[in-house]
Amino acid sequence: MRLSDHVEKTGKAFFHAAEKSGLEGIMAKDLGSPYRSGVRTRDWLKIKAQRRQEAVICGFTEPRASRKHFGALILGVYRDGQLSYAGHVGTGFDERNLGFIYEKLKPLITEQSPFEPEPKTNMPVRWVEPRLVCEVRFSEWTAEGRMRHPVFMGLREDKSPREVKREEESPAGAILRKVDIKTKADLTHLDKVFWPKEGYTKKDLIEYYGRMANWILPYLKDRPQSLNRHPNGMGRRDFSRKTSNRRIRRG
């Protein structure tokens, strides 16, 4: 067994670093508190990093129980000129904004779904013309392209629906911009396995460099490099390459 590493006093900075690196979040605890198996306490907290996404309101479901006006908003984002279903959001509303949003949706009700094909919803749905944009906080994208654990944050009257696209950045593009904004490269064989035992691929390595570039590059700037290359993965034949006449410069 090994004690997990930790930081003290700089929790906010640590959280922002985790958020920037694309991690799920951090654990926070009272330094004097013991671990209690199977018990929830305020001494140990999971603090999740949250993402934000603009979304087009494409419909709403019938309300349940005592809720009035609507149950959840059906959301979409534009992809290749077509609306793509991005899930639904049913939390983050109070009585006032439930009524306010419903009044804005009523004139937009239509029989025609803005999606092709029409997605399945967990409750009866009323489709609306895709004219309203909202902002949502959520934890991550699912494999099906849905927002997980979405929370409604508010309407975006400054945004045109056609501008709303899934906000996601290519790791390869991120690292190239950090190295040199003029650099262009075609990255191939991203599924090549570099660490067979762990199953890590070339794509995993690029994503890691993308997240860690701000910390790595200051130590490489203007310094000659010696590379130990493993073209067929760790544990296989390797060779060294001197780059004394080449220096890494930060763009």
Image: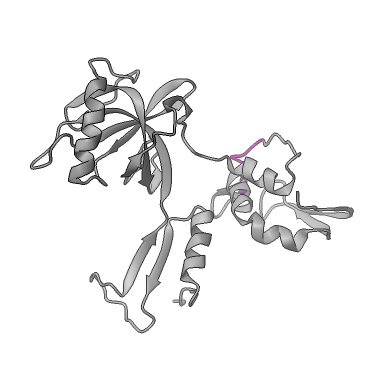
Q: How many labels were placed on the picture?
A: 0
**Residue at screen point 72% across, 36% down:** 185
Q: Position of residue 219 (x, y in %)?
A: 74, 63
Residue lying at the far right of the rendered structure: 245
Q: Residue at x 49, y 38 (%)?
A: 167
Residue at the farthest bottom position: 32
Q: How far across and down, in percent of the image, does residue 53 sit?
A: 42, 40
Looking at the picture, does residue 96 appear above or below residue 45? above
Residue 245 to residue 10: above or below: above
The furthest residue to the left: 66
- The picture places residue 5, in percent across and down from the top left corner, at 50, 74
Please identify the quarter of the rendering in which residue 158 is found.
Answer: top left
Which colour style is shown?
A: one colour
Magenta highlight on residue 6: no
Q: Is 45 on the left or on the right of 171, as rendered?
A: left
Q: Main secondary structure of the magenta part?
A: loop
For residue 39, say whether it is visible.
yes
Between residues 229 and 216, which one lies in front from this camera angle? Answer: 216
Q: Which residues are magenta?
A: 188-194
Assign the N terminus to one quadrant of the image: bottom left
Residue occupying the point 58% across, 51% down = 196
Please provide percent x and percent y for residue 230.
Answer: 72, 51
Task: Tell me if residue 189 is in the magenta stretch.
Answer: yes
Side of 217 relative to 117 (left or right): right
224 sits to left or right of 11: right
- Closer-to-camera residue (103/48): 103
Residue 121 in view of the camera: no
Q: Residue at x 62, y 50 (%)?
A: 210
Q: Specify the quadrant of the image occupied by residue 124.
A: top left
